[in-house]
Image (spheres, helix red, strand yellow):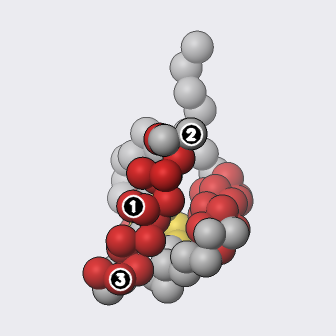
Amino acid sequence: MQQRTPTADDMEICAEELRQALAAHGITLPSLRVDLPCFAGTYPPPAGLVALGNCNTATARKPAAVLRGAVGR
């Protein structure tokens, strides 16, 4: 089955779902957003991009800890 290219709405929903899931663990990635430049090219990528953005090391360690904890379950 061929995967369809996500729409801008799909990408926004995905970014918001990720934002909410991270928030449930007390994590905020300030630059999390849809990567708008992926719409600028003549040939769109096969899948939309969600930019996780920049964050400091303390913030980057939080999702890493949550993911490590999830593996232990």
Return the residue at label 3. Answer: 58
* Whole-percent x, y for residue 4 in the image: 59, 32
In the picture, the disc for residue 28 is none
Q: Of label 2 and label 1, which has the lower sequence position?
A: 1
State which mark lies toward you, 2 or 3.
Answer: 2
Of residues 29 and 27, the one nearer the viewer is 27
Residue 10: x %, y % from top left: 67, 53
Under mark 3, the amino acid is: Ala
Pointer 1 or 3: first along the chain: 3
Q: Who is closer to the viewer here, 64 or 35?
A: 64
Q: Nearer the viewer, residue 58 or 21?
A: 58
Q: Secondary structure at mark 1?
A: helix
* 69 lies above or below 34: above
Q: What residue is pinned by disc 2?
A: 73
Q: Which mark is in front, 2 or 1?
A: 2
Disc 2 is placed on an element classified as loop
Q: Residue at x 42, y 62 (%)?
A: 65
Residue sitting at 49 percent across and 78 percent down?
A: 29
* Circle 1 residue: 64
Q: Is residue 37 above or below residue 49?
A: below
Where is residue 42 shown, x and y percent of the image? 37, 53
Q: Are marks 2 and 1 in contact (CB under 8 Å)?
A: no
Quarter that holds the N terminus? top right
Residue positioned most to the top: 1
Q: Is residue 20 above or below residue 68?
A: below
Q: Residues within 10 Å of mark 3 (few under 14, many from 20)?
A: few
Query: The disc labelled 2 sits on which kind of residue?
Result: Arg
Q: Mark 1–mark 3 contact, CB under 8 Å? A: no
Give the Cα separation between the discs numbered 2 and 1: 15 Å
Q: Residue at x 52, y 67 (%)?
A: 34
